[in-house]
Image (cartoon, rainbow, N blue to C red):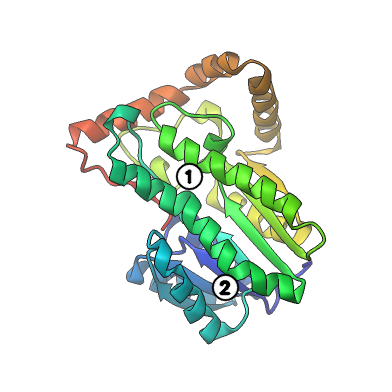
Amino acid sequence: MTTLTGKTVLLTGASRGLGVYIARALAKEQATVVCVSRSQSGLAQTCNVVKAAGGKAIAIPFDVRNISQLSALVQQAQDIVGPIDVLINNAGIEINAAFANYSLAEIQSIFNTNLLAVMELTRLLLPSMMERGSGRIVNIASLAGKKGVAFNSVYSASKAGLIMWTDAMRQELVGTGVNISVVCPGYVSQTGMTVDTRVSAPKLAGISTPKSVANAVVKAIKKKTSEVVVNQNPITESLTKFMLAIGQISPTSVDRIYRWLGVVDFNQKRAENRVKDGYVAVESHRS
C-alpha cells in the first residue's frame, strides 16, 4: 500500500491528542477516516480538522472498552464506508500509581482499552482483509512496553503485551497480503501525561512532537515497517534503541539510567499527585 489515497481508515482514540494528529496526517494523504472515540464533541472537532486538510471523515462515538459491543462498531463503520483498508489502534489509557494502589477496575480498564480492544477489532476486521489479500494494521504502543516503568506498571504490561502480540501476528500474517506494525513513542508533547502542568516530563529522556509520531504511523503503513521507535530525533532514537538492547543483557543497568534520566521520579510524582487528589486525578487518555 504505497498510497492512502481513497483508502478507508478506522482510527480509534480520534478525539484528542495524538489521534487528532494522526487523523490530520491521513487526511493529507486523501484518506477517508472513520473517527472513533467516546467524546462526541471531540470527534466533531477532529472531523473538521480532517475535512480542512482535504480528507473525508465519519464520526462514530464509541467506548472501545465495551469489548463485547465492538462487532456493532465494525458493522456500523462498514455499513457507512464499506470495507476497512487500514485499522489504527490508537485508543489508550494510562494511570500512574504504585501497583498496590490500583483498583481491579482500573487494571481492567487499562487492559481492555490498550490490548483486548485491539485484539478484538483486529479479529473482526482481519477476515475481510485476508479475503481481499490487502490490509494494514497499526498498533500504537509505547517505549513503556519495551522497558517497564515504575509507578506505571499496568500500562507497561499492557503495552508489552501489545508489542509481543503484534510481533506474533506479523509472523502469522506472512503471505496473506495483510501487514501489521507497532509504533512505540516515548514521551509525546501536548498529549496524555505531558499535559499535566504540575509535573514536567523529563527532557533528557526525549520528548517527541505528536506530528512526528503521526508521520511515523503513515510511513509504517506505506513501508510495511514492522516496528517503529519514535523519540524526539534520529540521534535520540538510536540512543534509545541502544539502551533497550543493553536492557536485554543487564536490566538493572537501564534501571539506573531511567532514574538518572528522571523517568522514575516523574512517574512517582504523578502517582503521588493522584493520591493527594483522592484518586480523582484524570487518567491520561487517547480515547
Q: Which residue is mark 1?
A: 189
Residue at image location 66% in from the left, 23% down from the top: 248
Question: Would you say 88 lies left or right of 44 here?
Answer: right
Compared with 137, 213 (above or below) is above
How far apart are the alpha carbons under marks 1 and 2? 22 Å
Q: Looking at the picture, which amino acid does disc 2 mark?
A: Ala
Q: Residue at x 63, y 57 (%)?
A: 138
Packing grade of label 1 (10 A; few <14, some 14-19, many >=20) is: some
| Whole-percent x, y for residue 200 in the image | 39, 33
Residue at the far right: name it: 175
Tag shown at residue 53: 2
Residue type of the residue flagged with mark 1: Ser
Closer to the camera in the image, 99 or 202: 99
From the viewer's perspective, is 247 left or right of 58? Answer: right
**Residue 115 on image: x %, y %:** 50, 50
Q: Quadrant of residue 107?
A: top left
Q: Earlier in the sequence, mark 1 or mark 2?
A: 2
Q: Nearer the viewer, residue 229 or 10?
A: 10
**Crowd rating for badge 2 (residues with CA inside 10 Å; few <14, some 14–19, many 20+):** some
100 relative to 146 in the view: left or right: left
Using the image, tell me which numbered label, if any, was put on residue 80.
none
Choose top left, top right, bottom left or bottom right for residue 180. Answer: bottom right
The answer to whether one can see residue 233 in this image is yes
